[in-house]
Amino acid sequence: MSVATDSLVSSSSSDDFAALLDAELDSDSSDGSPDQDCSDDEDNNAEGARIKRRKVLEMDTRVEVQGSNSNGFTEKAIEEATTDSCTHPGFLRDMCICCGKRMDDGAGVAFGYIHKDLRLGSDEVSRLRDADVRTLLRNKKLYLVLDLDHTLLNSTRLEDINSEEDYLKSQTDSFEDISKGSLFRLDKIRMMTKLRPYVRTFLQEASNMFEMYIYTMGERAYAIEMAKLLDPGNVYFNSRVISKADCTRRHQKGLDVVLGKDSAVLILDDTEAVWQRHKDNLILMERYHYFSSSCRQFGFNCKSLSELKGDENEADGALATVLGVLKKIHSNFFNPEHGDDFAARDVRQVLRKIRNEILRGCKIVFSRVFSTESQAENHHLWKMAEQLGATCAVEVDSSVTHVVSEYAGTEKSRWAVQNGNFLVHPKWLEAANYLWSKKPEQQFPVELTKSK
């Protein structure tokens, strides 16, 4: 059946929208893994579920159920079909994709990035996720959700470019070969965008290990334009571009609109606060501040990379570093020494274990880093240290290895120096968190300024 030539209502009465989508499986079976057992209906459905997301994009101008009377079918006839046993797995334009019954209560979860009118019921979402993850794991892949701004790129409004950045307007790259460029002026949306160094290599290598999604709190029109810059060949993301309008909670991102099981999803984002429900999946990225407007947005009183006419180093920049982390997580998850039941594994546990090894063996005391009125264990640096595998304490003793402070003159700081322990700036912790390795303490000295 061709989606381009056949409509739902011109087929037999037993046909439904889901069957129309699933029928495309036959013509796309070559996409599956070579060792796929074609006699296994459930696995075939798994591949079909993945193809659904691509094929449904073609339906917008082809499937005209509402009011259609093709081949004698009317809306009334559809409503009178045997719908009592239908579970209504999903809806297209408020009509069940199986039985055609109209539902006006906004049932299901909207998957507007797949199709602007598509809503799926919770049971169908679970079915699709189960099917999808089986296929993905069989091909030794996981899911990777990628933030845009300050993670993969940095954008600014054209009117926010200052005099020190004005030189950039003559250095933008051509749209004739986007894949070779990194700085683009998008007059249609009045923006200039700088891709983060190493992003193209990152996406190419990550695509071998992950099925990737874009997930931004920006508007959809902006997200689509950024996806074109990052993926001009449309080989990495396809329709998997999620924007602000797709979020199910205000000011929050969620995996409820990602067709992947939480246990197989990793997230790269520079903002932890938007992932309150999925912090265990998150790898926090160091923010990319290329334009001056980005520095001002976050309250930094310093020159931006563009003003300094510099940029991150590709070889040891944020994306190169996190790619190494992703490779390690992927390798650990699919380690054959743990057997071949990948479905029983949880990538969050792998992530937690690798992160927990970074500062293992370190015992940390903080000095004048937190307010005396706050609970130390609730401070983000205390939590960060524990996530990295360190032990934290309030008072110094012979087991303490590091004192973290901004001031060398505090009592605890002087104790560290007198006893030959490490006295480091809080940025030492942040560096370990972003770079996923314990950095030399000597690179993070504490200046002698205030005393207790």
Image (cartoon, rainbow, N blue to C red):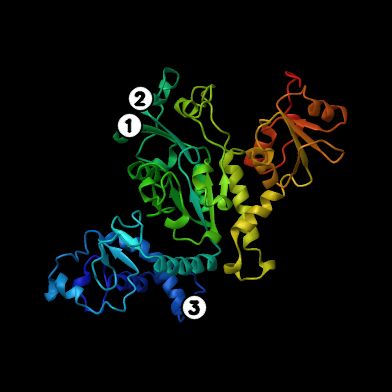
Going from N to C along the chain, the mark reached first, 2 or 3, is 3
Q: Is residue 155 visible to us here?
A: yes
Residue 159, disc: 2
Q: Is residue 170 visible to us here?
A: no
Going from N to C along the chain, the mark reached first, 1 or 3, is 3
Around disc 2, counting alpha carbons within 10 Å, would you say few (fewer than 14), some (14 to 19), or many (20 or more)? few
Residue 191 location (% of width, % of height): 36, 32
What amino acid type is highlighted by mark number 1? Arg
Taking the spot 82% from the left edge, 35% from the top edge, the residue there is: 396
Residue farthest toward the bottom in the current orientation of the protein: 39
Tally of numbered discs: 3
Around disc 1, counting alpha carbons within 10 Å, would you say few (fewer than 14), some (14 to 19), or many (20 or more)? few
Q: Nearer the viewer, residue 34 or 116?
A: 116
Whether tag 2 and tag 1 are in contact, CB under 8 A, the answer is yes
Q: Nearer the viewer, residue 164 or 119?
A: 119
Using the rendered view, name the quadrant where residue 78 is placed: bottom left
What amino acid type is highlighted by mark number 3? Asp
Q: On screen, 174 above or below 97?
A: above
In this figure, which residue is indicated by the disc labeled 3? 37
Using the rendered view, name the quadrant where residue 383 is placed: top right
Taking the spot 34% from the left edge, 72% from the top edge, the residue there is: 22
Q: CA distance from mark 1 to mark 3?
A: 51 Å
Quadrant of image for the C terminus:
top right
Residue 321 location (% of width, % of height): 61, 43
Residue 378, disc: none
Taking the spot 65% from the left edge, 53% from the top edge, the residue there is: 352
In this figure, which residue is indicated by the disc labeled 1? 190
What amino acid type is highlighted by mark number 2? Glu
Q: On screen, 153 above or below 281?
A: above
